[in-house]
Amino acid sequence: MISNERAFAWGASIFVVLIALLAPLAALGKFQTLEFAYVWAFAIAIVGVNLLTGYCGQISLGNSAFMAVGGYTTAIVVTRLGWSPLATIPLAAVLSAIGGVLLGIPALKLRGLYLGLATFALALSTPSLIRHFDNLTGGSQGIYITGAGKDPFGLVEAGQLTSEQWLYYLAFVFFVLFFLFYRALLKSDVGRAFRSIRDGETVAVANGISLRYYKTLAFAISALMAGVAGSLDAMATSYVGPDSFDATIALALIVGAAIGGLGTLAGPIVGALFTVWSPIYAQVIFKGRPDIAYGVLLILIMYLMPQGVIGGIGRLLGLRRGVRERMVAVPSTPFGPVTAGVDDEH
Amino acid sequence: MATDLFLVASVQGVIQQVVFGLATGGLYASLALALVLIYRAMETLNFAQGEMATFTTFIAFSLLVYLHLPYWLVFPATVVIAVLGGIAVERVIIRPVERAPVITLVLVTLGLFAIFNGLSGLIWGYVVRPFPSPFPTTPVFIGGVGISYQDLGLIGVSTAVLVLIWLFFARTKVGLMMRSAALYPESSRLLGVRVGWMLALGWGLAAGVGAVSGMLVAPITVLDPNLMQSVLLYAFVAAVLGGIDSPVGAVVGGLVVGVLLALVGTYIPNVQDLRLVFGFLVIIVVLIVKPGGLFGREHVERV
């Protein structure tokens, strides 16, 4: 029998995919199409943060640095070597995953707050690192990527898609691929190992889980996703600069993950919608200071529903099943036990 | 002969840089001390410490420039405002999540970071403003080494703040109550110490120390809403280097970081702009090699 929340999850997924596929053709203007391309790109990066912080328990405030690796890889390779933008994505993925492993190695020694501190320091120092190597990165000027909206299949040139639509579908397809990967990963032994590290390292080790292997793996995957997101973001903007990936972006990623719900499967989508659209609405309410809206919402979410929007919905839907589940093995999020429906199945 | 002269000049140069490093290091030490005060009380870091300091520095700026109040009145008034503000932030915003997991507290202080940064920008704008210094920048020559009054003033004020904080904790009853509330909350409560208010007072003191740091940083750089972001990073470095639960460590760490940055920036070519990256690397290296820092205790976890 299909349970309530599984039926809901399937229905919601099909609805989201249909809307996502049709909207740019039917309803969205050029500008909005591009905005939603950012949504999917950010959703990929937030999935990465959620995997690392929400599921593996490693607080990362520095994933913006890996977005920078991806974004600059695309910008440099397209402008200097003349590659097609699409072809740079695998390279961006590999380079940022290497970056993730490099950060993951020292991070093995750090826990909780200290890891947050170190990764935040990384986020704060990223722009100055980019400015320093100005031969490669164009320094403070950044790099304008000409032809970022070009597709290798000629659909844009043939007039079948606008370049905005191409960028949108590119980001969406990558998001769907990463989302399916992340969902499968979480159901696998690897996902179980991640969660068990989050819930108690000592117990995880006692159960034969290698912290070194799984934590490094979590960093690598998370960084890879951030890198691809950075690459897609650079294409959609046609520009990268040192401030494209500063501490504000680092903050936006963790805020997005928390608002959607850390340790929830669908949280990143809600988080990405919020991250991309709230600055635009905040423009009206807070005179262009989205930070205030971010801060207030983040704190309110922490008070009212620490498992984020998706966690809150899961809770509402799973109220009845909650009692039974509490008596069996209780799945938990970084904020303690959850009643039901949040983690999908284990 | 020429090389001799060069040598003399560079020795004086080094001394000059060391003094400058101590002066800026005192500022890092103050903000690091603010972080440590909160860490000792509730084992979390306030990521918004720098932004709160920036906000109070803007308040000082308004008092000075719009109300034309004299500097030495504005200085203590701002510290008092900061202390009250810090207490209010703890009582209103932190209290509901006091016992929550680390990540919740980190996220809430990141929320505060965004709010204070946004508020500074909203109220005072992103224009870069000069902030007056109470000390002239003219140099005084001691043994052939030119040292600015400003550097000496900074060293003097930082020292005074640190000594006052130390006296407060070591010699006053409230200081003792705060220490006991942090170390043994349950027993303290039984003895009639209002632990919650001690936490709030800790936040207040931290905000006050941070305010001093902000008002002293602003004349050296310029005042804008991102004033304290790099200082916060160096304060993190200082706190980690000294041992995150050690006030003495924060001070020593701050001074070491200040001097190191001054020397590295001057004598290693082409890395002036990599100071933040240098800070990040120091954090990583210290946390790996000596996680307890120079003066802190190693963290031991019980299962």
Image (tube, rainbow, N blue to C red):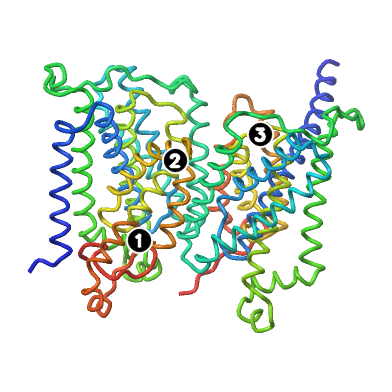
Chain letter of mark 2 equals A
Disc 2 to disc 3: CB gap under 8 Å: no
Residue A181 x %, y %: 20, 49
Residue type at mark 2 is: Ile
| Element at label 1 | loop
Q: Indicate the position of residue A343 as horizontal and vertical percent values.
A: 26, 62
- Determine the CA span between mark 2 and mark 3: 26 Å
Residue type pointed to by label 1: Gln
For the point 64% across and 42% down, the residue is B54
Residue found at the far left of this picture: A1
Q: Nearer the viewer, residue A301 or A283?
A: A283
> Badge 2 local density, few (<14 within 10 Å), some, or many (20+)?
few
Disc 3/disc 1 C-alpha distance (Å): 38 Å
Quadrant of res B292: bottom right
Q: Is residue A14 above or below residue A77?
A: below
Question: Which residue appears at 70% of the width and 41% of the height?
Answer: B258
Q: Nearer the viewer, residue B211 or A207?
A: B211
Query: Is B121 displayed left or right of A274 in the figure?
Result: right
Which residue does the numbered mark 3 point to in the structure image? B223
Local secondary structure at mark 2: helix
Task: Say if labels 2 and 3 share a chain.
Answer: no
Chain bearing tag 1 is A
- Tag 3 secondary structure: loop
* Chain of the residue where label 3 is placed in the rendered structure: B
Task: Tell me what residue is drawn at x 25 percent, y 53 percent.
Answer: A266
Image x and y of residue A64, in percent: 41, 40
Q: Look at mark 2 in the image and give the residue it sits on.
A: A285
